[in-house]
Image (spheres, rainbow, N blue to C red):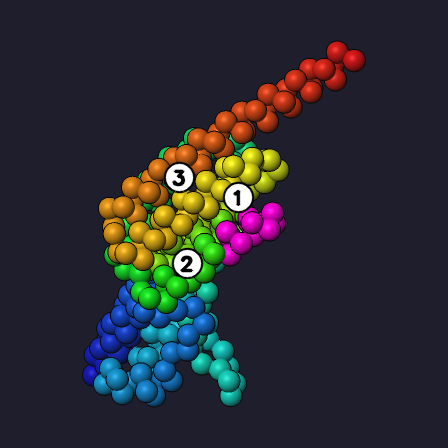
Amino acid sequence: MPELRRRRSHRVSETIARRLKKQISTGALNPGEKLPPERDMAQRFRTSRVSVREAYRSLEELGLLTIRRGAEGGAFIADLDHGPVMRSLSLMLRLGKTTNDEITEARLLIEPPIARLAARRARPEDIERLQYVVRQQENALRRRGDYSPFDLQFHRSVAECARNLPLKVLMDALSDLTVEVVAGLDLPSGIQYQVCDSHRLIADAIERHDEDEAFKLMLHHVAQIQSRLGRALARQRRTKKNASRNGTRR
């Protein structure tokens, strides 16, 4: 009988963990949100606190929960870090294991479908946050300030609208990698205005829940940006090569 109870408790804890993982992946539970105490969760699932504790511990091991002790403690949804993915991609780029062309291919495969999902799933608060980022970027550009942080934030906000955690992690990593590639490149102001215009159109399509238009606009936007980036990197390589050649001649 004790063995039977242990197996039943294990199955219940797996069920609780599975349901919580689904809620995290769909965005129903957000980073920093506190889960109900073990006692309340046990009542909800009509099980023991031991089963709930096992479920919480298994999610903590996966990095999905943070368990804090003390009066203000409890089980909190972890803020998932895309850093390991980003650092791995960055290292491959520096070692020459990947190229801007491969980054372009990855972005074209990932970002347009994310925009489609964003148009399908975005909630009013998601759209409000996305439009705020676009306005901040436009204001920064008008003031001739640095608009690049908002450029990165825009793509992250679109991914948040899609409410798919794996896609969000991939999108965040690719966005950070693109920013790393762009760093040091002097892009003309005309291109910066075109980027802002594209972001405005994409945000408006998402607000209208126009999935096809959001997909098409994002596809065109990413293709344009990566093409310009490729040309800018090629110019940079030629400039360095010529400078090296001239230095050797001296």
Residue 53 showing in the rendered view: yes
Say which quarter of the image contains residue 20: bottom left
- Check disc 3 and report the residue beneath it: 222
Q: Residues within 10 Å of mark 2 (few under 14, many from 20)?
A: many
Rendered residue at 41%/34% (across/down): 224
Depicted 167 relative to depicted 227: above or below: below
What's the magenta region? 136-147
Q: Tell me which residue sits at (23%, 85%) in the image.
A: 46
> Considering depth in this image, is 32 or 227 the residue closer to the camera?
227
Asked whether, in this view, residue 95 is left or right of residue 18, the answer is right
**Residue at left offset 29%, top offset 85%:** 42
Q: Which mark is residue 103?
A: none
Q: CA distance from mark 1 to mark 2?
A: 21 Å
Which residue, given by chain and number where applicable, does mark 2 sit on? 131
- The x and y percentages for residue 47 are 25, 84
For disc 3, the neighbor class at 10 Å (few under 14, some 14 to 19, many from 20) is: some
Q: What residue type is disc 3 on?
A: Val
Kind of residue sitting beneath label 1: Val
Q: Is residue 137 above or below residue 27?
A: above
SS category of the residue bearing label 2:
helix
Crowd rating for badge 1 (residues with CA inside 10 Å; few <14, some 14–19, many 20+) = some
Q: Where's residue 154, x and y in %?
A: 44, 52
Q: Residue at x 51, y 41 (%)?
A: 192
What residue is shown with label 1?
179
Please tell me whether residue 209 is drawn above or below residue 1 in the rendered image: above
The residue tagged with tag 1: helix, strand or loop? helix
Q: CA distance from mark 2 to mark 3?
A: 19 Å
